[in-house]
């Protein structure tokens, strides 16, 4: 018998498309951040190497692309910041202000 998780819809999510709902799931799953061994690596249709962390809902497996912006946003997460937004609104999650040290990590 096939595992129910094998039949989940799979969605790759970039920071620009991150919703409050997915962000909340990530913070719940990785309350202390994520480690290298929790990062999944794969090649997309353009043969680009993608690194992502996984979070699953009842019907969908999200692979959220790893980035400095994601790390900073997860570290500073406060659900009250998103109470005025719909939980599926990608406009709600704004680019974080990065310190000089964080910005260097982007290079």
Image (cartoon, rainbow, N blue to C red):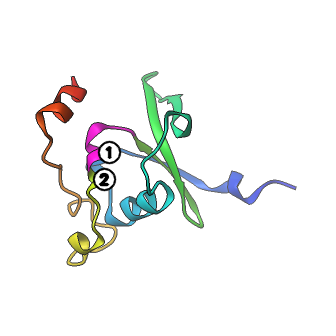
Vertically, is 82 above or below 66? below
Q: Position of residue 77 (x, y in %)?
A: 29, 61
Observer-nearest residue: 3 or 37?
A: 37
Quadrant where the C terminus sits is top left
Q: Gap in Å between the C-alphas at discs 1 and 2?
A: 6 Å
Residue at x-position 28% and y-position 38%: 68
Vertically, is 100 above or below 87? above
Q: Position of residue 37 (x, y in %)?
A: 56, 35
Horizontally, is 27 left or right of 101 in the view? right
Tell me whether circle 1 and circle 2 mark residues in contact (CB < 8 Å).
yes
Q: What element carries label 1?
A: helix
Residue placed furthest toward the bottom: 84
Residue at x-position 62% and y-position 56%: 8
Q: In the rendered image, which residue does mark 2 sit on?
A: 75
Residue at x-position 21% and y-position 64%: 92
Q: Position of residue 72 (x, y in %)?
A: 26, 47
- Which of the 4 image quadrants contains residue 66? top left
Q: Where is residue 64 in the image (x, y as percent from the top left)?
A: 42, 46
- Which of the 4 image quadrants contains residue 100? top left
Q: How many labels does the image show?
A: 2
- Magenta-colored span: 66-72
Horizontally, is 6 left or right of 26 in the view? right
Answer few, some or many: residues within 10 Å of disc 1's Cα (few below 14, many 20 plus, some between 14 and 19). Answer: some
Residue 36 on the magenta segment: no
Q: In the rendered image, which residue does mark 1 sit on?
A: 71
């Amino acid at each position: 018998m096939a595992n129910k998780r094998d039949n989940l819809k799979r969605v790759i999510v970039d920071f620009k498309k991150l919703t409050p709902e997915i962000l909340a799931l990530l913070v719940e799953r990785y309350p202390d951040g994520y480690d290298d061994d929790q990062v999944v690596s794969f090649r997309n249709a353009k043969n680009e190497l993608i690194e992502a962390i996984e979070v699953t809902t009842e019907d969908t497996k999200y692979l959220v692309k790893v980035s400095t912006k994601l790390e900073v946003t997860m570290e500073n997460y406060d659900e009250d910041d998103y109470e005025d937004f719909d939980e599926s609104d990608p406009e709600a999650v704004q680019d974080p202000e990065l310190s000089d040290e964080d910005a260097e990590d982007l290079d």
